[in-house]
Image (cartoon, grey):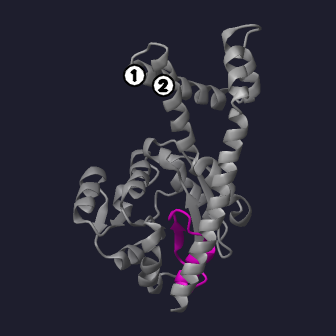
Amino acid sequence: MLQDKKIGFIGSGNMGEALVSGLVLSKAAKPENIICSDIFPDMLKKIHEKYGVATTADNIEVCDKSEIIIYATKPQVLSSVLKETAPALDTAKLVISIAAGVPLAAIAAGLKKELRLIRAMPNICAFVKESATAVCAGPFAQDGDVELARAVFDSVGKTVVLQENILMDAFTGLSGSGPAYIFTIVDAMADAGVKMGLSRKDALFLSTQTMLGSARLLLESQEHPGRLKDRVTSPGGTTIAGIHTLEQGALRATLINAVESAAKRSKELGDMVVTDFIKNADG
């Protein structure tokens, strides 16, 4: 789907590079069809040498040479980059933003044009090609635009298509922030292993491998997690004793509250970003 598409990246930092790596190494896109810009020459040199893609310091050149343009900038500079590049954009181009927390309404306000917009939110696991990415289409996206966006982000994991105004904040609370919850759980389990006599190295490895194996079993078996839990839990055994302790500590309620709190904060920050973008667009 992307083999003959010209793809441009404005911003080639960590997430931009992760996407370039996914597209090139999975052969979803040809390196000669990818062009990247960045303000740091060393970053451009590295990404060119590593992946064989074209590079430039000129954001307008990226727009002129690309059919799909991915804005992979930091949220705080996106407004100025959109103003700079808006004259080079038209409906022949698909515009995708991965700027964290910046809603489609804010992007549209920055561009002041009715363009084919997609907002996508990959998570940190894109660096190991295991991202959970949400994709949301703007009102002027055309047939096939969502599938093109999914093809980009499927190169670094798996995607879901969501309605931004209803579910994007929920996605942020669950999968955007979720890796941090998992890292905290893994760290706590490793601490427990150390407390029980394991070395720090062995405890962290065992905690991490247990988390990885459990996730893979869930994905590949397609069984409900409760059923898999029951398969591990013998009557009167060690696992039910541990689960009882987790229930006493309100683990489920705590995780539910964490996702809810993060989702609410996502909504608050999104509203603030929209307000700032509209002010800048009018200024």
Q: Could you tell me which residue is drawn at 48 percent across and 25 percent down?
A: 191
Q: Count the marks.
A: 2
Q: Is residue 141 magenta?
A: no
Q: Residues within 10 Å of mark 1 (few under 14, many from 20)?
A: some
Q: Quadrant of the N terminus?
A: bottom right
| Amino acid type shown at disc 2 | Ala
Out of 45 and 3, give the one closest to the viewer.
45
Q: Is residue 104 magenta?
A: yes
Out of 86 and 224, give the one closest to the viewer.
224
Residue identified by numbered label 2:
190
Asked if labels 2 and 1 touch by Cβ distance under 8 angstroms, the answer is: yes
At which x and y percent is residue 189? 53, 26
Relative to 183, 175 lies left or right:
right
Residue identified by numbered label 1:
200
Question: Residue reaching furthest top?
Answer: 236
At which x and y percent is residue 130? 51, 41
Q: Which region is colored magenta? A: 91-114
From what the image shows, is residue 189 above or below residue 174? above
Q: Could you tell me which residue is drawn at 56 percent across and 57 percent down?
A: 121
Report whether residue 201 is seen. yes
At which x and y percent is residue 41? 23, 65
From what the image shows, is residue 4 above or below residue 186? below
Secondary structure at badge 1 equals helix
Report whether residue 144 is seen. no
Q: Could you tell me which residue is drawn at 66 percent across and 56 percent down?
A: 263
| Amino acid type shown at disc 1 | Arg
